[in-house]
Image (tube, grey):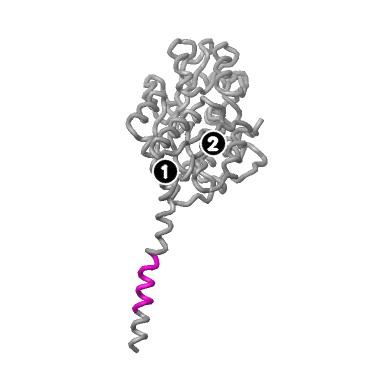
Amino acid sequence: MHSVHHRLIAVAFAVATAPAVAAQPAADSAAGFPSRPLRMIVPFTPSGPNDQLARMVGAKLTEAWGQQVVVDNRPGAGTVIGTELAVRSPADGHTMLMISLSTAVNSVLQKKLPFDTAKDLVPLINLALSPNILVVHPAVAANNVAALLTLAKARPGEIIYASGGAGSTTHLSGELLANMGGVKMTHVPYKGANPATLDILGGRVSCMFGTILPTLPHVKSGKLRAIGISSLKRAPALPDVPAIAETLPGFEAVSFYGVAVPAGVPKAVMNKLNAEMARIITAADTREQLRQQGADAVGDTPAEFTAFFRKQMSKWAKVINEAGLQAQ
């Protein structure tokens, strides 16, 4: 009887301590991380907003952890080349990928992808959000969004809008405008925002959605006219430019810049990466730097960013399918 009682106590003790023992490795699995240099894959050419953010955050991670963060630019195939490289990398947290709207819409725009965006990638953190500005060439007889839509209704397909590429935020913002405004406009994709801007400045296209930073100087110099902003509310950088949502309620088309990791990275490692990046991006100096570039720092949790990313995937899938778009 005595030995049975002792055995019961021993079993009870084992049961009571088991969760603590089992939880130990998980808690410690991020202790030695990072153990070597980290790689941040940017699926775009250098000097764009994704690249700039990757370098800014990477430099501060290097400072904090003493491990070099190597920014690896792998442009091409509408972000597919860089994304495939990331999902094929070891899922240990040492390889990360910059993700944006292009990543979210690829599964709809491209017939066959070498990976499953929803399964093979785990959104880690949304670093920043940035609205785009709708600008027209001064020769276009439209001082506001309503006037542009009236013009487009009267001349179906004659209003030509430029974008930085098929499936980019600047392209899909235009599709959403035509869709919600009930008009037909003609889209001309360019290989980046720079050549698109040159053609609107030259009057070869009527309008375009541009990212704030490179477009603002042309608005201030009077070479382009800003008639709307793509966020739900007006932007602090352009308080006099109405939100398109003031004319088309619910209109919202913002660029987001986030980081993802290949599926399978231990939760403790993900949490460590997320916490450090959130600290970096929400620091007062970083916030101010982003604000001057027309962007807002985010710094959310993996769960929040995953929910946001999935919402973006379904929202834009609807726009793409209704417009009958395909990657070019």
Image quadrant in which you'd find residue 73: top right
Is residue 189 found inside the magenta-colored segment of the image? no
Q: Secondary structure at mark 1?
A: helix
Judging by the rendered image, the residue that carries numbered circle 1 is 274
**26 relative to 10, above or below:** above
Q: Secondary structure at mark 2?
A: strand
Horizontally, residue 276 falls left or right of residue 114, namely: left
Q: Position of residue 275 (x, y in %)?
A: 38, 43
Q: Position of residue 269 (x, y in %)?
A: 44, 48
Q: Is residue 186 visible?
A: no
What is the distance, in whole Å, between disc 1 and disc 2 at their CAs? Answer: 17 Å
Disc 2 marks which amino acid? Ile
Camera-nearest residue between 181 and 61: 61
Judging by the rendered image, the residue that carries numbered circle 2 is 41
Magenta-colored span: 9-19
Question: Which residue shows up at 52% across the image and 35% down it?
Answer: 100
